[in-house]
Amino acid sequence: MYMERRATFGTWFAALAAICAWRHTWWHRGKCALASRNLKQEIIVRLKGYDAIHAHQDRLGREINDRWDGCAGAWKYTKRSETAHEHPTDFLVMSVAPKHKTDLERFVRSVDFVKDTHPQNRYVDLLASTDTPTERSPGTRHMLEVPTKVGYQPAKELEAELLWTQGYEGEGVKIGIFDTGIKLPHPSMENVTERTNWTDENTLEDGLGHGSFVAGMVGSTNPSCQGFAPKTKIYTFRVFTNAQVSYTSWFLDAFNYAIATRVNIINLSIGGPDFMDAPFVEKIMEVTSNGIIMISAIGNDGPRYGTLNNPADQNDVIGVGGLERDRYIASFSSRGMSTWELPSGYGRIKPDVITFGRDVMGIKISSGCRKLSGTSVASPVVAGAVCLLASTVPSSIRWDVLNPASMKQALIEGAEKIPDASIFVQGSGKMNLKRSAEVLQQYVPKATLQPPVLDFTDCPYMWPFCTQPLYASALPTIFNATILNAMGVTGTLLGKPSWIPDNEAGKLLHVDFAYSDVIWPWSGYLAIFLAVHPGGSNFDGVASGFIKFDVVSPPGLGESEERRCQITVPVKLRIIPTPARKHRVLWDQYRNVRYPPAYIPRDSLEFKSDLLDWHGDHLHTNFHGFYDALRSNGYYVETIGHPLTCVNISQYGTLIITDPEDDFHEAELSKVYHDVTEGGLGVLVLGEWYNVKIMKTMKFLDENTRSWWSPYTGGANLPALNKLLGPFGILLGDRIFSGRLSFGSQHMRITSGANIIRFPAGGHTATADSHMKDVTASTYKQSTEKVDWHIMGFTEVGRGRLAVAGDTFCFDSDGADNCFWAIPHLLRYTSEGARDKALFEYTTQLEEELDQTQLFRPPEYRTDLQFEDVSHVMDREIECGWSTTLAANSNMPFNQMHQETGKIADSNSSTGSSETPPWDRVDGKTDVASGAQRDLSHSKGFYTSRGEADSLAEASVHQFSTLSVAPVTGTPIFLDMSMGGRMLARVYGASLAAVTYLVFKMYHRFRRPPLRPRVE
């Protein structure tokens, strides 16, 4: 009986265990099966070295299966092109179920041979005409083409025939065309050596015509649309589908293949604003570090400034702008400066050169010629010319002499300046084929500076530097020059550059420098800080002198001594007596946050073609018209990219805060309140819209991350502005208005602006006229049509003054209808207290305090997003940046600061307030916001150079085996692409070079015969 009961109990227990196991298996497998059907998100896994795709996949797969506690069906490897499987790679592509993505990525990043992970970006090409703006996915890379009607032949216009008659036609040169492929046979193309397809379409043919046009600009033999170098070997890389779509991994595979096949030149007629797309950006650097000359279109976002496209905005790439006819800048051509460096630094010069980009003749998809415009046309014009130029260098030394730096030097030195265009529009000028060929005939590898001369009296070419002289006590003028080093892929400065005055006035200058620790690949930056010593406060004249420094690089192949070159840069500028306080203006740049890395929306909701705010909001980018208006009216403007506590504001008549996206440190709020009420400072505040309901409707599904993107802020950060304005009795509301403010015969166009809902008694306000509309009226039940809408206000507080407006549109150069006429009247009020009739005759003085907070709500911070992720201020300590910047403004000896507080140790500097402002007047969130300047990126890269690999060609198989299995180590260095934005890279030298070369060599020797790829 006991045994029967025992057996019965055991049977029931076993049955229960079986049911639980079945339920667990069903539940677990069911979830995983469900996950496997939903693998929508793709990630790129970058690896610490090269190997065959299957080897990488097996190794990572084992790690995931053995150690990751997740669903086996939650991920899979994404299919790659057959060609990619033939060669070593340094990345994998994985499809991941959305609900498992975060956990799996976290695990993958912890694997020791994994470098990092990134979204698989999708690039959508829309052939947008500048005449008819076309909506495209925000932030995407795209081909830069503009339809047109008339035609020019660049090869004829640039006199390529002069080199053809000498026997140079591009022979011995290989170029890669990254585009939509080419259709063969083609009657105009005789030298297409290889076609490869990297897309998910099973074809090598060009179904759009863009790739054919670009390739024909290099090698066409049609006399009606002649290419520059018909004997150049053309390799077409089909990276865009016929639906005009591409992915990051397609480009990465194609770039790896370009390195393996040793093409000499690559043309990229694509671009986009995302300079923080690390896999793409760093792969470009790897390509150029292998000696490949990269040429890319600068963008079709002109005539707006601050619209450079990546990768053309990189130092190691030749960025090409568009020319119209023979001497006019094409309106569509993007302008500089670069914005990587903002807010704390200053941008670089781009484009590098310009050439024909409008009405250019090129081959059709099957036969004949057609006409196109765009910088995607200008780029292959330069690429074709570079192929022709390369063939003029004797083949025995050609690729020892030519590299990304030397070819850029030849183009720059041969270029012709275009009259009436600044350096940020034309770079070094119009490409001159004949002069560049002459440069190469006598060329010896060297280091140079771009630009080679700093003549700040040369207008308009050196705009904006030529328009404002230097004076004592000003913040230093910063010029961000580019070092081009053709002596080697890496180099360093041999000590700090020196300043050598050429006249007595030159001795009044203090010149300081910041520069790349390592010049790599082929380029680096030299930031030049120029300031006048206090002893020059009454001087008026021209200062001149020279900047000198030495660049050294490792010995070349067969050489025993390092290469060295001394660079001498003439400098010329004007010094004037220090202007009166009322004529000095301080522009707050520190508050700027833009795309990338966050979704920061455009200031105007009316413009649907571009959702992102990516132009920098700088006086020398999209506010350049504002700058010109200030200067033409006698105001001297300085820009601060650090907290306001880092500068002596008492020297300025007006502080301008325009379209701020970021927050304020509490110490800054106290300082501004004190300097206005006690120090007589004037403040001009230009806001923008901010409405959380509208912001939430602006979200879009990002196709790269398969996640919803939503704006971190509105056009401006009004909750932060209200923290600044609240103590003065001023608040801005969350309604959005569009229309105009009338001032007699003049008016201000308001586009997506905010209204003033609180203002102190005695102040003056300007109210909307009948043309104004409440854009947000439909989202609120309460009508406001019978209430005055106050859009601009003026008030005196203590010894100072404030002018506040709810919109910046008409002050932004991107706006179609500017109101620069109002700038001198606004500044005369804030700096001097003058009430010009042009404004005040059309305002109303408030007899009592304006308080519409019951009708209009002040905006509140978004609580569903972490703005701290992109803020320079929130949760960060105050950091004042470079000592030269601070000390120059404090009238102290240079490089002497109060290191403990980070503020200027100067008895004349007002760094705080003796009176606590009435913070209770601020509606909304009042957190303590403190923060330090954040680096733009911390991405890590692994690179080698072709020359270093070649020097290890005799390495043994034993060395190969050892190096290929051991982790490659190197010394981390800061690769400063430019001031304010540091990109962390690793330079590995011989170790990684050996791995790269020998992996290629041994893999090809011992691998199995591959499946036949789609290669021709």
Image (cartoon, helix red, strand yellow):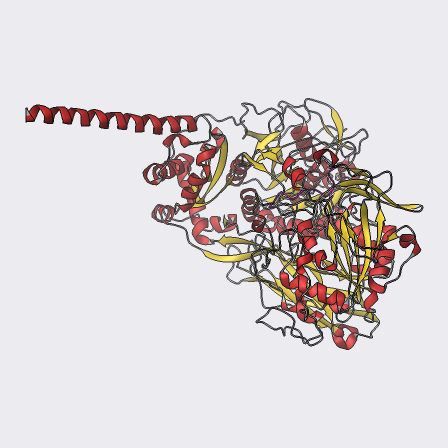
581 relative to 838 in the view: left or right = left
In this picture, is 847 found above or below 860?
A: below
Q: Nearer the viewer, residue 632 or 219?
A: 632
Q: Is residue 14 visible?
A: yes
Counting from the top left corner in percent of width and height, residue 999 is at 42, 42
> From the image, which quarter does the N terminus lie in?
top left
Figure quadrant of residue 303: top right
Figure quadrant of residue 654: bottom right
Q: Nearer the viewer, residue 78 or 1004?
A: 78
Q: Which residues are magenta?
A: 597-605
Query: In terms of secondary structure, what is the magenta stretch mainly?
Result: loop
Counting from the top left corner in percent of width and height, residue 527 is at 66, 61
898 relative to 304 in the view: left or right = left
Does residue 604 belong to the magenta stretch? yes
Q: Nearer the viewer, residue 544 or 311?
A: 311
Q: Is residue 234 visible?
A: no
> From the image, which quarter does the C terminus lie in?
top right
Figure quadrant of residue 387: top right
